[in-house]
Image: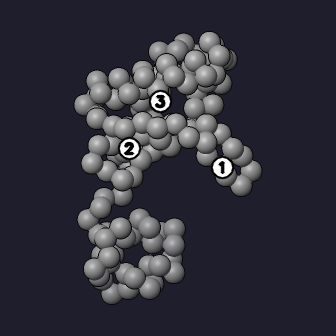
């Protein structure tokens, strides 16, 4: 199977795997450009959310090409996506997740609020 065919079938099968796990999600394919790499990504966003998970489709295709059974590749992708959803920060105004990476933002926005941002909901 060539990459374009894999991409289409993989997207359908991951969506079905998520549905089987009780997750209704929107899936889009896009090109991700980072400083030292560019890759085809599957962006999976749960219904009702603005925050999604990106997975590098080229890495999953590489695993398939290297002999991992297709069904195992799909199962791994579904597990990775479910894990990404489980580890997303809540949207209850708790900015500690963001401030872990951006200490200045924590000092400016969250100081004296016990980690909750006053009037700012991330």
Query: Residue at label 1?
Result: 33
* CA distance separating discs 1 and 3: 21 Å
Q: Measured from the top left, where is residue 117 in percent x and y?
A: 32, 78
Whichever of callouts 1 and 3 sits on the residue coming sooner in the sequence is 1
Q: Residues within 10 Å of mark 3 (few under 14, many from 20)?
A: many
- The label shown at residue 1 is none
* CA distance separating discs 1 and 2: 19 Å
Q: Quadrant of residue 115?
A: bottom left
Whichever of callouts 1 and 2 sits on the residue coming sooner in the sequence is 1
* CA distance separating discs 3 and 2: 14 Å
- Circle 3 SS class: helix
Whichever of callouts 3 and 2 sits on the residue coming sooner in the sequence is 2
Label pair 1/3, CB-CB below 8 angstroms: no
Q: Measured from the top left, where is residue 93 in percent x and y?
A: 29, 69
Query: Residue at label 2?
Result: 45
- Circle 1 SS class: strand
Which residue is drawn at the image coordinates 37% and 81% (left, top)?
A: 110
Which residue is drawn at the image coordinates 29% and 82% (left, top)?
A: 118
Query: Residue at label 3?
Result: 77
């Amino acid at each position: 199977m060539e990459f374009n065919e894999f991409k289409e079938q993989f997207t359908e099968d991951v969506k079905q795997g998520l549905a089987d796990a009780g997750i209704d999600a929107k899936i889009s394919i896009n090109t991700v450009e980072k400083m030292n790499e560019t890759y085809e990504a599957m962006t999976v966003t749960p219904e009702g959310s603005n925050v999604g998970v990106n997975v590098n489709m080229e890495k999953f295709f590489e695993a398939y090409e290297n002999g991992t059974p297709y069904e195992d590749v799909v199962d791994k992708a579904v597990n990775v996506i479910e894990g990404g959803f489980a580890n997303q920060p809540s949207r209850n105004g708790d900015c500690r997740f963001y401030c872990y990476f951006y200490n200045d933002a924590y000092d400016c926005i969250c100081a004296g609020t016990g980690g909750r941002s006053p009037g700012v909901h991330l």
